Amino acid sequence: MHQLVGDHALDIPPIAGHDRQLTMLLCSAGRRVGLLRAFRRAAADLQVDLRIIACDTQPEWSAACRLADLSVQVPPASSLDYVPAIEAICRGHNVGLVVPTIDPELLPLAEARARLAASGTTVAVSALPVIEICRDKLQTATFLAEHGIPVPRTMDMAEADPRRWKGPAIVKPRHGSAGRAITRIDSLDALTGTEAEPMIVQELLEGEEWTVNLYFDGEGALRSVVPHRRIQVRAGEVEKGVTGRPEQLMAIAERMAACLPGPRGALCYQAIIAADGSARVFEINARFGGGYPLADYAGARFAQWLIEERLGLPSTAANAWTAGVAMLRFDDAIFVAP
């Protein structure tokens, strides 16, 4: 199979003889128990002996690390020691597949993908140009608008002029994620300019909020598009949602696939559908979204398709999934004896 790193293709051989054994590394595992379980279900259905290693900065406080076969402590993704730590885990445990889960680790892992591929480790991450677009919300809006994909009015906060922008807006970190530091303002007169990081101002959109899960195979072909309506959100993550097939969101996914430079594996974008039926995109995440378990349960089994691809098994990736499937998240706990 071939994967792109920048403008260069890498040959990553399938595991010899379709050996149904695989060790994967789930990065920044945190609370991603649903994602971990999706990979376990996929492996069971494929009759693959899957060993899951989970890493985190504090694995003892990570529910997913507690449920993995092995947990490992690593530095923060922002540290220069992060990639060497990931490479050491992959070498020491014969890791065949690395799955990132948070935005800060996407860029360093994409930059390290060629080195990891040389030793037989596939990193489920898009090419660098895609990461660079998605990690910068201003660049995301500019790129999509240039390719005819509808977006809200967006500008750097430092350039926002209250005299030229009327009405409410959203202020958010230019490189933020997980709903961090997002503020609604009634007018640009409320801007203080005292923020400690680059911020953007974005037109406030009204309507239904949707996340659209996308799966791209190793050749960059879009294989599945799974929208779900975000009925209730907590801490930036969907708590109640339901799958559906709004035509405008499916069409945007196709247009996005045609212009993104090297998408691979799981991505998702977020959009608002207004009362008049128009849809505008305000964010792309080049990773598994927090609501992915809903797509998986509906039949879009990205985790299984990644395992199939890594092991050289026949791909079952398809866009056949069930609309109207609902997810109602609730709090659960893992208890650890002293």
Image (cartoon, grey):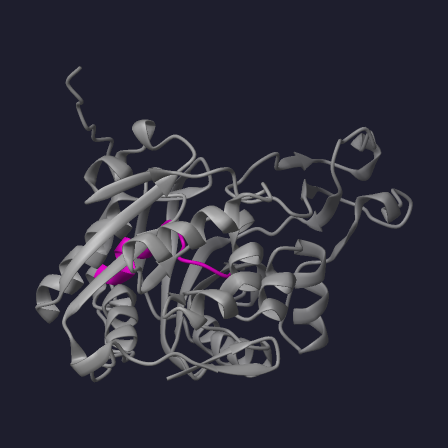
- Residue at 81% in and 28% down: 194
Between 168 and 316, the residue placed more toward the observer is: 316
> In the drawing, does residue 261 fall left or right of residue 156?
left
Residue 325 appears in view: no
Compared to residue 145, the image places residue 182 above or below, namely above
Looking at the rendered structure, the number of numbered marks drawn on it comes to 0
- Residue at 61% in and 55% down: 135
- Residue at 19% in and 54% down: 51
Magenta range is 286-296
Between 158 and 188, the residue placed more toward the observer is: 158
Q: Is residue 117 magenta?
A: no
Residue 159, percent from left and from top = 87, 48
Which quadrant, please, contains the C terminus?
top left
Residue 260, percent from left and from top = 58, 76
Compared to residue 76, the image places residue 285 above or below, namely below
Residue 128 appears in view: yes
- Residue at 83% in and 32% down: 193
> In the drawing, does residue 265 fall left or right of residue 168?
left
Query: Which residue is outermost to the top?
Result: 338
Residue 3, percent from left and from top = 46, 79
Residue 245, percent from left and from top = 35, 71
> In the drawing, does residue 17 fall left or right of residue 130?
left
Which quadrant, please, contains the N terminus?
bottom left
Q: Is residue 290 magenta?
A: yes
Query: Which residue is outermost to the front?
Result: 92
